[in-house]
Image: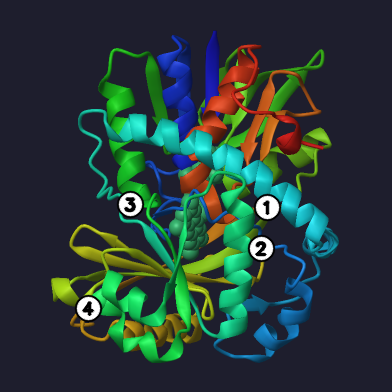
Amino acid sequence: MHVLILGAGVVGLATAHVLAAEGHRVTVLDAERAPGRGASFANGGQLSYSYVAPFAGPGVIGKVPGWLLDPDGPLRFRPQFDPHQWKWLLAFLRACNAGQAARTTAALLALAALSRTLTREVVALPDMAFDFAPSGKLVLQPDAAAMAGAVRQMELQAKLGSEQRALSREECVAAEPSLRHLAHRIEGGILTPSEEAGDARLFCEALALRLARGNQAVSFRMGLRARQLVRAEGRIRAVVTDEGVIEADQFVLALGNGARALTVPLGLDLPIYPLKGYSLTLDVADEAEAPRISITDSAAKVVYARLGRRLRVAGMADVVGDDARIEEKRLDTLIRQARAAFPKASDWREIRPWAGLRPATPTGLPLLGAARAAPNLWLNLGQGSLGFTLAMGSAAMVAAMIEGRATPIPAEPFAPG
Ligand SMILES: Cc1cc2nc3c(=O)[nH]c(=O)nc-3n(C[C@H](O)[C@H](O)[C@H](O)COP(=O)(O)OP(=O)(O)OC[C@H]3O[C@@H](n4cnc5c(N)ncnc54)[C@H](O)[C@@H]3O)c2cc1C
């Protein structure tokens, strides 16, 4: 069976890896010349298997006005004359209820657990150097009320298999001494020792190299934009590119935010919207001053991950359309927050900034499965702020469906509507 995978981000490459290992002939296509140049490029670096609660939670609607009024707030909204933006926002607001959030969390925890097992198998392969570290993760809480809420969530997740511990302020600093500059504005934190971190771009590059060089039959068509899916007699027959047509038996859409441009002409209006985020990458100047444990500052909604000799800082969710340009004001905010938290971690002379677009669904659940438009068109899309974490699990799910096997976990929560 020849499978054409559209998209060489972390999701597409994970899918190629699983399908090639099953013995299929795989072609990966991407508009960029190198893998991992989209949302996967300089993300937060967190393999966040236990922190999967969706952005659309029951408390979010009440908090949104405060965030929007705060110029340094984690959320920004620029209204546009774009029906897709409004449709997505309405669906997001509808998803902001306790029932949906609990269903999403349970489904994502199962997918993340599957992903963890499979990602660890990939980590163990030769030549998979991507600054991976079993770093654990500490989520800081600003006050007693936030801490009490975090403990309740921890107790809930304990029933679903998560192993976490509540730490006081002093215990947080004892576990991660570089936190001492932040300690005055935290109540405590939740430590999850099993969380991991790594560089998603390096992961993509290493995996692509393995696939291209290995005995498996994977070929890459890089620097080639897909323009159109050709449907005939109810099936997808080919993809039209700038350099002709590519035929295959099965087609996997792993194009992140690029997917809608190909599906809308087929009558498929996917609920995926670009949620813009920012990151900084800093060289570590003083080992003792940069965190080894991944840190989430839950009040500022900023994450920190140690990637070898570098520190990755990421945050913000801007609803501003398909626009990945860096806004200086937003960047300055992130630099200020990071510098206040870990002032001596870097000399702050070379700050490598990046902005990327998370391919987000309103509920936070990715779309995994056959598209309504054709039985051989498979969606592996919409992993939002968890694409690195969920890539391997999502790939295993879609590969099982393509092969007509039972999926490793129930597929129903992820079924494209
Ligand atoms: C600031 C930020 C921080 C994040 N932090 C984390 C984190 O800590 N942990 C985590 O798990 N996730 C995180 N994420 C989310 C994660 O990065 C994404 O979910 C993930 O990268 C999505 O992968 P993808 O392969 O679906 O999309 P992409 O990586 O965007 O890949 C899609 C590919 O499709 C290609 N493409 C698009 N259209 C076409 C076309 N027409 N023809 C050919 N090619 C095309 C693009 O060039 C691109 O290479 C973060 C995201 C951001 C923005």
The amino acid on which the numbered mark 3 sits, given as a three-letter code, is Asp
Query: Residue 68 or 155: which is nearer the viewer?
Result: 155
Does any atom of ligand 1 lie closer than 8 Å to the CB of label 1? no
Identify residue for label 1. Answer: 364
In this rendering, the label closer to the viewer, 3 or 2: 2
Helix, strand or loop at mark 3: loop
Query: Residue 142 or 286: which is nearer the viewer?
Result: 142
Instruction: Give the quarter of the image for residue 192.
Output: bottom left
Q: Position of residue 358 (x, y in %)?
A: 57, 57
Dot 2 or dot 4: first in sequence order is: 2
Which mark, by number, is residue 345? 4
The amino acid on which the numbered mark 1 sits, given as a three-letter code, is Gly
Q: Position of residue 112 (x, y in %)?
A: 53, 42
Query: Compared to 46, does 344 lie above or below?
Result: below
Dot 2 or dot 1: first in sequence order is: 2
Question: In 3D space, how far apart are the residues under numbered discs 2 and 1 (Cα atoms)?
Answer: 7 Å
Question: In 3D space, how far apart are the residues under numbered discs 1 and 3 (Cα atoms)?
Answer: 22 Å
Identify residue for label 2. Answer: 55
